[in-house]
Amino acid sequence: MSNIQSMFDTMASRFDSAAAGDLDAIFQYKLDEGDAYYATVSGGSCNVQQGEHDDPTVTLLMDSETFQEVLEGETDGMQAFMTGRIRAEGDIMLATRLATLFPV
């Protein structure tokens, strides 16, 4: 199993269904190196899959180091976005909910 895959497994294991409520969204992750993954949040559950979704709600672009730092709580996701380490396309406001959906 790749390091990237294990990072997404870690993220999925932290999913907070109470924070999700009735959210229905697809978070596409594109890392500068490695494969793309997406997290489907629907009905209070989260499913992470490898690949690119046809119609993601928001797409997040970053390098794997930034993703790992955000996952480990070393870097604040919002701060990384403001400094250009994370780029977002689509429903950018939805990306602001990631910290509550996947708490460190």
Image: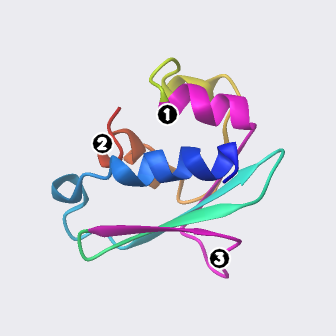
Q: Which residue is mark 1?
A: 71
Q: Is residue 9 above or below residue 104?
A: below
Which is nearer the N-term, disc 1 or disc 2?
Answer: 1
User: In terms of sequence position, does the residue under pointer 2 or pointer 3 come before the other?
Assistant: 3
Q: Earlier in the sequence, mark 1 or mark 3?
A: 3
Q: Is residue 13 visible?
A: yes
Q: Amino acid at mark 1?
A: Leu
Tag 3: residue type?
His
Q: Is residue 70 magenta?
A: yes
Q: Classify mark 2: helix, strand or loop.
A: helix
Q: Taking 31 as reference, is 23 above or below it?
A: below
> Which mark is nearer the camera, 1 or 2?
1
**Alpha-carbon distance for marks 2 and 3?**
23 Å
Q: Secondary structure at mark 3?
A: loop
Which residue lies under the disc numbered 3?
A: 53
Query: Is the residue under label 2 in contact with that under label 1 (CB below 8 Å)?
Result: no
Q: Is residue 77 above or below residue 87?
A: above
Reply yes or no: does residue 84 show up in magenta.
no
Alpha carbon distance from label 1 to label 2: 12 Å
Which image quadrant for residue 53? bottom right
Question: Which residues lie in the magenta part?
Answer: 45-71
What residue is at 59 percent from the left and 72 percent from the top? Answer: 56
Q: Which mark is residue 100?
A: 2
